[in-house]
Amino acid sequence: MKLSFFVKDLELKHTFTIAHQSRDIQDTVIVKLEHEGFYGLGETTTNPFYGINQENICLSLENSRDIVENGSWNTPEGLWEMSRSVFELNPFAQCALDMAAWDIFTKMRGEKLYKYLHLDPKDIPMTNFTIGIDSVEKMVEKMKEVDWPLYKIKLGTANDLEIVRELRKHTNSPFRIDANCAWTADQAILFSEELQKLNVEFMEQPLGKDDLEGMKEVYKYSKLPVIADESCIVESDVKKCHGLFHGINVKLVKAGGITPGLRMIAEAKKLGMKTMVGCMTESSVGITAIAHIAALLDYVDMDGAMLLKKDIARGVVITPQAISFPEGNGIGAELVV
């Protein structure tokens, strides 16, 4: 097995702003595994909020080289466990490696990933399209630019309700609201009453990840379901979110890849919680991987590649009418630049 990796900068169509950061460029790292004429691709993006950059991702991947190239693993799960200690502080890097392992593993078996997992693409829920924080006028422009049947609206301003009321005038599509930890419990409970009237499906991570007492109140009194994001990073967080959130949003990048992501989804289902997988503005490499497991989910947020000015890969094609997978086996994404 041969391991290689390289960095790329993904230019966004619009400045993307959430409650705690803005960006015009999304840094990413692509991993490639090669063996006996087959190859697999994986991806992880960087995130300053979590202290993750291209340099420490590449360092972690380099530290895994001996295990990857000389270790006695023959499944993605086996590689994930063998390399776990290497990536203890950098699950983002482990995600890219795990994704590449699933890609090459299923290619060598001659199967698409979703078929190996016994999933049917017909069961994939509609992805939302995300509108980042901006002036109301520009947020409306972004909605008109991409006419979509379901929007996620990023909030965390002093005028959040006013923003949603104004956006509602321009579309009948349902909204999902993501405050990225910006609200208090009292705000979230109060806002939920008005947001319910504005055809909002759920609120994602309204409070800071450590505000457990506040979330108990929101969970009890909110008029809308609440979905955990920043509060649910790794597998051990799933049980902690039970009784505080109605569902979890698994980010493969933050969790460490497809391998732990599948376990998190299964655990949440056992607990009777809703499941969602979200993206971190990946190219079509990472987004196609998400699409392969999306049939497991109640909700999906896999619009990352749609936010890019220029994609670096070909993969799943998502329209309001259909989701089309690439022809090849494995995950199937291919780099184009």
Image (spheres, rainbow, N blue to C red):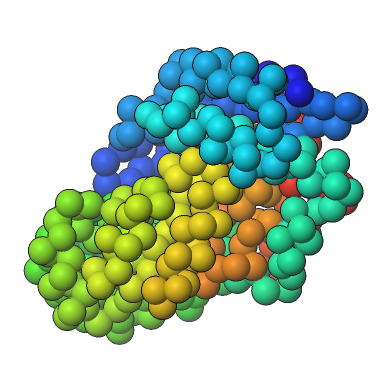
Q: Is residue 151 above or below residue 220?
A: above
x 68%, y 49%: residue: 288
Q: Is residue 154 above or below residue 172?
A: above
x then y, percent, for residue 169: 39, 74
x then y, percent, for residue 309: 60, 37
Q: Nearer the viewer, residue 285 or 166?
A: 285
Q: Nearer the viewer, residue 267 or 307?
A: 267
Q: Quadrant of residue 335?
A: top right
x then y, percent, for residue 69: 69, 20
The C terminus: image quadrant: top right
x 41%, y 77%: residue: 272
x 35%, y 53%: residue: 236
Q: Is residue 281 above or below residue 237?
A: above
Q: How many numbered circles are shown?
A: 0
Q: Nearer the viewer, residue 228 or 69?
A: 69
The N terminus: image quadrant: top right
Left or right for 91, reference 284? left
x then y, percent, for residue 24: 45, 32
- Residue 113 visible? The answer is yes
x 37%, y 29%: residue: 89
Q: Quadrant of residue 78?
A: top right
- Residue 95 visible? The answer is no
Left or right for 319, reference 268? right
Q: Is residue 321 above or below residue 18?
A: below
